[in-house]
Image (cartoon, coloured by chain):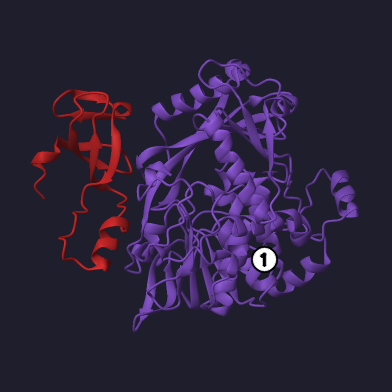
Amino acid sequence: MRLPCPFCGERDAAEFRYRGDAAPRQPPPEADAAAIADHLYLRDNPAGPIRELWYHRGGCQGWIVVERDTRTHEVAAAFPASEDRR
Amino acid sequence: MPDDPGPPERRRVRRVRGPMRYSILSLAAEALRNNRGWPPAWRKAAPKPSYSVVVVGGGGHGLATAWTLAATYGIRDVAVIEKGWIGSGNAGRNTTIIRSNYLLPGNIPFYELSLKLWERQEADLGFNTMVSQRGVLNLCHSDAQRDAYARRGNAMRLHGVDAELLDREGVRRIAPFLDFDGARFPITGGLMQRRGGTARHDAVVWGYARAADRLGVDIVEDCEATGFLLERGRVVGVETTRGTIRAGKVGLAVAGSTSRVAAMAGLRLPIESHVLQAFVSEGLKPLIPQVITFGAGHFYVSQSDKGGLVFGGDIDGYNSWAQRGNLPTVRDVCEGAMAVMPMVGRARILRHWGGLMDMTMDGSPIIDRTPVESLFLNGGWCYGGFKATPASGLCFAHLLATGETHHAAAAYRLDRFAEGRLVNEKGTGAQPNLH
């Protein structure tokens, strides 16, 4: 599998570290325990398109968001995590 | 044996008394007949309109659950529904290792119960599952790692489990072919569990299917769950590709696909699906006496009775429903092999494959009721489900039959995540790809 790093171009996935689903967002400090447990532990785990965080450890060391299909590994888009607007 | 097996009732009676009781006589008779007369080991059951219990998933865990329900708890009005055929899923994809060499108090009793059940499985099922207690040897490569193994071995012995800390010479006596003096990963010793070993994975599902069938369990193949029948928030049945099946209770045993199946009942779980690859080499003469694991990378190997080296390593490391892996992990596994066992470098890989793993947020399984009434969950087996098969069946059947958690599975509650009672053997935090 190759990932199109927005800074480095298409690179071997082995250069990256995986952080998982990009959807969970840290709840606000006043959130209750259930919301925090949900954030930490519960995942949609889609069989299909997912937006996920990768860290380009063996390259630019940037965090990127990749839109990938978990059934085919086809990558639809990749952009810097700082530009992630959902 | 004719293709049309006749009505199930008549056939079951005939089979209990007939040739399906394997014996030395039936073996000899079939040898003379070129083995053409063996009847199927279980009926190809069609689903009835309703059952007391429907188990979704005809892998080892689902079949062991159904067999235990019938054999131990006397609940025989049970169906196992399987989307493919028996043995077509992860039951046929794993690397067949059985062991109970865990560290944490939540894990040791469960896996030790499982190993004890493996030890009597062939007698329980009347089927040769080729349980081979050849020993499981974890190699260590530094003083710190030896200390960690001593701690784990002591934890095991405190729970009454066998464990033996070997020094370098002790390892050398067992496996002289290892690279003891590699500059990066010299072998300093190992933790041996002699009661661990391997079993024949296909025979395990065949044995459970046959034994469950003989007790009246319907094993319904080519029957995929497509939804749940809900009445006032309670599950009362399963929609399948072979029609609606009503059920008093429904148990899920679909590890690998748990998120997808549970989502049909509206559940969101602490599980990600990842792919794990495994490999078999060409057949070789007897070479590797135990199950051996490399301690400085992720590589483990045993030798099958056919002679192939069965080995594997890490999961690929990212969410995947693809059932096939990528090359960086292949390289990593082969590097591990060469680092510890350079003699295998010229053996050719015969085939390799990938299977889906339910990776939970703490690396431990779930056997519990769910927030949906009458729906029970057995899943999250990460890449360690095979060794758990008999105890998983027992604990899940206990839960389904009595409504109570079996004491050996007390730590595997679904609410442990919200309550902070994680069972995290590796201590890596809520990141499934690191377990």
In this rendering, position of residue B112 left or right of residue B244: right
Which amino acid, by three-letter code, is at mark 1? Ala
Please tell me which residue lies in front, B213 or B122.
B122
Pick the residue in front: A76 or B137: B137
In this orientation, which residue lies closer to the viewer: B36 or B219?
B219
- Asked whether residue B337 is in view, the answer is yes
Above or below: residue B152 compared with residue B67:
above
Instruction: Please provide percent x and percent y for residue B348.
Output: 58, 20
Chain under callout 1? B
Q: Where's the C terminus of chain B, which quadrant? A: top left
At a point 61% along the width and 77% down the height, the residue shown is B77
Label 1: element kind? helix
Does residue B99 appear anywhere in the picture? no
* Number of other residues with Cα within 10 Å of mark 1, as a class: few under 14, some 14 to 19, many 20 or more: many
* Rendered position, B9 above or below B417: below
Q: Is residue B79 left or right of residue B361?
A: right
Question: Which one of the lettered chains is coloured red?
Answer: A
In the drawing, does residue B19 fall left or right of residue B176? Answer: right
Whole-percent x, y for residue B432 in the image: 38, 47
Point out residue B182 in the picture as x, y percentages from the top left corner.
56, 16
Taking the spot 67% from the left edge, 66% from the top edge, the residue there is B213
Query: What color is chain B drawn in?
Result: purple
The image quadrant that residue B311 belongs to is top right
Give the residue at x 60% y 15%: B346
Q: In the image, residue B264 lies at what x, y percent?
A: 34, 66
Q: How many numbered marks, from 0 up?
A: 1
Which residue does the numbered mark 1 point to in the structure image? B212
Question: Quarter of the image holding residue B107?
Answer: bottom right
B31 to the left or right of A67 = right
Picture quarter with the N terminus of chain B? bottom right
